[in-house]
Amino acid sequence: MKRWGRTVLAMAIGVTLAGGTGFTGTQGFRADAAGVVDILLGGTLAMVEVNSELSRMDDTAEGQQQMLQERQKSTGYYDNYSYQDRAKRIFESLTDTPDVKRTYVVYVTPEEDANAAMSLGRVMSINKGLMDMMDDAAIASVVGHEIGHGENKDAIRGLRKSVALQTAVGAATANSGGLSVLLGNVAGNYVNQQVFSVTQEKNADEWGFKLLADAGYNVGAAAVAMAVLRDKYGDLYTDGLGQIVNPNNHPKMSQRILDHLKRLEEFSGKHVSVTDDVVYVNKKPVYTGEPIGQYTGAMRAYLVAGKLARYYHDNNVNTPTVQENQVWMNGSSLVTLSSSEKAAEMEQALATAIDSKSSKKVKADDKKNKVDSKAKVDQENKTK
């Protein structure tokens, strides 16, 4: 209101200056000022109508279908059952978790750029290019990030700030169908060019990690997804996916990798950590990542750490075993190494790291028991 007040004052001064000697008395000023107020009041009412229409588009099934059609018209629809089914399966594994309250629709576009976006209307699009670059767990991390934007209503909040008053006035004077179509186009353009705030991006990353964990995926995949994008596009990729995931005013991809690794460490109860391509258990190195296929050594370290973090989180850490060149725990493979000798070395290092924490706990328990016993004896002697 203060800004509008200044606008009214400025326009009133402008009318006065423009009138020159032709401006006579307060009656003319009141008429001109009243015209300014009428314009601003009309803009206010138009914004109310625009906000109401945006809410309809974002919160209702009808609005969702409208935005689905708008988005598919803009991005295209990839007519491939296996891709669409894979996207739906990953998406549903995340939206079936307790924290997701809103309902969404998802589809795959034919675009080759590694991109994913959450639109107004709770419409999720995933590019074919992203699906070709990542495994299910890494895709789930990116998708979970976008669901975070949807749950926080970041798109509609940004839209409400970005729609100019004059656009609202023009839209509100059209018929309701025209307003709906215009806002649908505005929303589509906004998604394509959206730059979220640093806080919104960090919150969405936290959502992505939490949904990944709750859905039972390897939590190391959150760091892997960011590493894949960084390795392909660089730390500050500013086109395509960069507009959604990593524009210039956002944290660097490298920082987001570190943030996800910190979340992994917290998830493990601070038992598991990663520095560069080395996995640590209870602060002891147990595995140095070896590159294989499309995975770098660091990426493989993230995934091994993710498995171990899950075991610690679930209080299900058992003695590791070796089968040829693989290290196993709890009946499943932790990692395949380049030789049986390296597998044996990792098995021994991991067993020692796990036991070191257990030994410290046993010693601490023994010390506590001795203190308690001494206190009990002292109390008995005092009573006697």
Image (cartoon, rainbow, N blue to C red):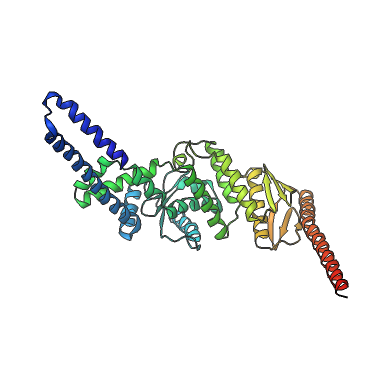
Q: Nearer the viewer, residue 283 or 369?
A: 369
Residue 293, above or below 320: above
Q: Residue at x 13, y 28 (%)?
A: 23
Q: Nearer the viewer, residue 131 or 1?
A: 1
Residue located farthest toward the bottom when viewing the structure as drawn? 384
**Where's the N terminus, which quadrant?**
top left
Q: What is the x, y in percent for residue 285?
A: 75, 47
Q: Nearer the viewer, residue 3 or 227?
A: 3
- Residue 229, visible in the rendered structure: yes
Residue 252 as seen in the image, left or right of residue 102: right
Residue 157, above or below 240: below
Q: What is the x, y in percent for residue 207?
A: 51, 53
Q: What is the x, y in percent for residue 65?
A: 32, 56
Residue 331 as seen in the image, left or right of residue 374: left
**Where's the C terminus, which quadrant?**
bottom right
Q: Nearer the viewer, residue 222 or 82?
A: 222
Q: What is the x, y in percent for residue 370?
A: 85, 65
Write down the quadrant of residue 7 in the picture: top left
Q: How many marks?
A: 0
Residue 108 as seen in the image, left or right of residue 343: left
Residue located farthest toward the top when viewing the structure as drawn? 21
Write down the quadrant of residue 37 in the picture: top left
Write down the quadrant of residue 383 in the picture: bottom right
Q: Residue at x 77, y 48 (%)?
A: 342
- Residue 294, visible in the rendered structure: no
